[in-house]
Amino acid sequence: MAARALLHPFFETLVPPGFLALVKTDSEKPPPLLAHRSSKWFILTTICVAVFTDIFLYGIIVPVIPFALTTRVGIKDLDVQHWVSVLLAVYGAALLASSPLCGWLADRSTFRRTPLLVGLLALAGATLMLCFGKDIGVLVAGRLLQGMSAAIVWTVGLALLVDTVGQQEVGQVMGFVSIAMSVAILVAPLLGGVVYDRAGYYGVYYMAFALIILDIILRMAMIEKKVARKWEKEEEPVNAPSPPQEEKVRPPTQRQDSWLPPPDSVLHMTLSEKKLAKKWTIEDGPPPPEIPPPEDLAAPPPDIPRTK
């Protein structure tokens, strides 16, 4: 946090206030494009560009150093190889000595972004010293700062990737980081020699400064996942338990004979018999003819005259 507080006044003198409003992460309001700036792919792109910048600046000056030592520093031709070896060795020594310390500080810092910005300042300072230095001591100091910056990128940057993607996707993101490193190793010496031959000494560092500016923009725009969760929790509404839905009771299906009277009534029996009779008539043909009752039973008894 102390390093972060020291960085803000420095950047306020270099960048417009509107840009600081975009990169600040300590305000109560969520910053613009929060979802994109804290996404996995944006953070992965930022770390890959940081690795590419570190390796590119390491390799771009390899074809330039021998000429810079003779024309700018005034080293004799017999001593050029000796000082080239020294400048390459001090980079590795600074990387070796700084990596454990950077890892220890990264585990105890609140945010990973602050060490990355400090490493970016070291890288910019080292590039300036290598570009404008005309003394062998300045060049050695620049290579030391460059090695320290590489230690921050490799320790803090990879730790940030693990924090972002988790252990399940570490292999995939490390593949992308390896691609960035391999491309930088491939193109840096080639571009350094070609640009030095075509555009001169400062043309090589123009490429370096352009890449550093891109790295500055990405590192300052990046928002860590754990920082973005603070605003995501505020924006997400509290999921209140939904009221239990009342089950709709379906009305009982009416039977086809629901128009009939109650079953215990005489009228129901009569109508039911008529309905069954109609059904039998349709299915089995006409009902059998009615047999008239016998005459003796059907005829009323004769009137018996009364006798006085």
Image (cartoon, rainbow, N blue to C red):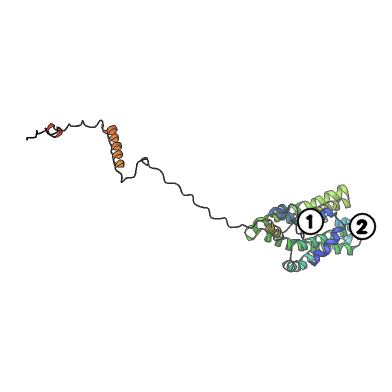
- Which of discs 2 and 1 lies nearer the camera? The answer is 1
Furthest-front residue in view?
308
Residue 46 vs residue 297, the one in the foreground: 297
Q: Residue at x 13, y 34 (%)?
A: 297
Left/right of residue 211 with respect to residue 169 in the rendered view: right
Instruction: Count neighbours of disc 2 (C-alpha within 10 A) and say few if under 14, some if 14 to 19, many if 20 or more.
Output: some
Q: Which residue is drawn at 88% across and 55% down?
A: 67
Q: Identify residue for label 1.
A: 23
Residue 74 image point, x, y percent: 93, 60
Location of the C terminus by quadrant is top left
| SS at mark 1 in the image | helix
Give the alpha-carbon distance from disc 2 to disc 1, as whole Å: 39 Å
Residue 5 vs residue 61, the one in the foreground: 5
Residue 231 image point, x, y percent: 71, 58
Residue 172 vs residue 8, the one in the foreground: 8
- From this viewpoint, is residue 56 visible? no
Location of the N terminus by quadrant is bottom right
Residue 257 image point, x, y percent: 36, 40
